[in-house]
Amino acid sequence: MERTYIADVKPGSTVRIQGFVENLRNKRTMAFLVIKDITGKIQVTLEKEKSEEMASLVDTLTVQSVVTVEGEAVANEYVKMGGIEILPKSMKIESLAEALPIKDDSDIDCRMDYRWIDLRRDQNHLMLRLQTTITAAMREFLVARNFVEIHTPKLIGAASESGSDVFEVKYFDGAAYLAQSPQFYKQMAMAAGLERIFECGPVFRAEKSYTNKHATEFTGFDLEFSYVNGVEDVMKMEEELLAYTLGKVKAAHGEEIKTLFGLDVVVPALPFPRMKLADVYKELEARYGFTVSDSVKGDLTTEAEHLVKNLAMDMFGHEFLFITDYDAKERAFYHMRNEEGIPQGYDLIWRGCEITTGAQREHRFDVLKKQAEEKGLGKDVDFYLQFFKYGCPPHGGFGVGLDRLTMLFLGISIKEAQFLFRGPNRLTP
């Protein structure tokens, strides 16, 4: 008999289900098992007198063991899980579980030590299905708009972007680095005439950060596209992409997210509000009494970033806010600048957390070379500058962290928003 997923079990059918024993009530004459697979849960009800063999098996069974059960699915209005139970005809223990070393309320680091067990929780199954929906929705949106998916190398010969925060690895008789973003290769694709590309892949950051939103390895979803007329085109692309994605998430998981995490999925109205950085600081001071020194007003401080959650709601009734007009010294050298020297880029803040830095890129070789030199970047970016010597269209793009999006959707830490977290103190499992 072929396996039946629990979600597909119908009353009146004979089925073969397989999964973990999530709960077990073993009475003298009856046994009640809750079996869980990736699609759901179902109750198995055993009258022990009908099968001494199965009764003996159940007496040895432990919670989180893996079993195969064949039997008849019947309707029972007193059963809470869908009003269906299985009356078993045979049972096999595939794997007997020892006593679990963690519980649902164990501290986060202990649960990370046994992540493969922690991942069995309903919340974590939802987390991974959510990520699947997010990436599928973004791919669907972009493919419909003539984007091509590429896969850039993660082993590179020179430290990328700023030259800092990269991991050096031994590469035969020399050294290589783990890419901290696909940025340079995304732009190379523009010089190659591909016009519209995206990538979903690993990103590495050698930052000793211990916050609830930083990781040394995470999954980035990046895109780049040519023939933009300005940074506004980039912001428009991102807001439409995110609104589409949140709509898909709400339809697929909105009720479950509300049940398991107590949060609503709000599909944002278009367009997203936009503010200049200087105006953000003025409003934060006027509304909340928040002030910073002039020396740091060229960038958004962490505390200001958190307050933007309130600012966006109070001013616009919106969860998202684009912030533009950062100081050039706080932005990457490859951001295009206008005649006043203002970078043509932005940060996008969602629920008080930065999820994107996007921009129109500088595509003119001489200007780009000059801006790199201003930042003190020399040989590290020589290979990158070659991409712009032989013609390159105007272009722009952005990237979002899949794990950070998941974190904000569910109101959890970055450790819980990844299949396996990597941080300064975490390399296993």
Image: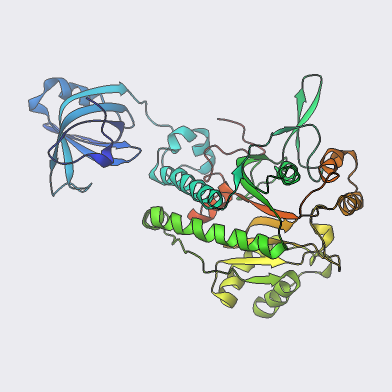
Between 20 and 199, the one nearer to me in the picture:
199
Percent x, y of residue 199: 62, 43
Q: State the image quarter where residue 421 is shown.
A: top right
- Quarter of the image with the C terminus in it: top right
- Residue sitting at x 8%, y 26%: 50
Q: Residue furthest left?
A: 49
In the rendered image, the vertical position of residue 74 relative to residue 3, given as above or below: below
The percent coordinates of residue 384 (x first, y second) are: 82, 41
Reply above or below: 314 against 305.
below
Indicate the position of residue 4 as horizontal and vertical percent values: 26, 33
Res 304 seen here? no
Task: Name the foreground residue: 71 vs 364.
Answer: 364
- Residue at 84% over, 44% down: 390
Q: Is residue 25 visible?
A: yes
Side of 383 relative to 57 (left or right): right
Residue 298 in which image quadrant: bottom right
Residue 290 screen position, x and y as percent: 70, 73
Quick check: 97 left or right of 273?
left
Location of residue 12 by image quarter: top left
Q: Quadrant location of the N terminus?
A: top left
Q: Residue at x 79, y 67 (%)?
A: 297
Residue at 61 percent across and 59 percent down: it is 237
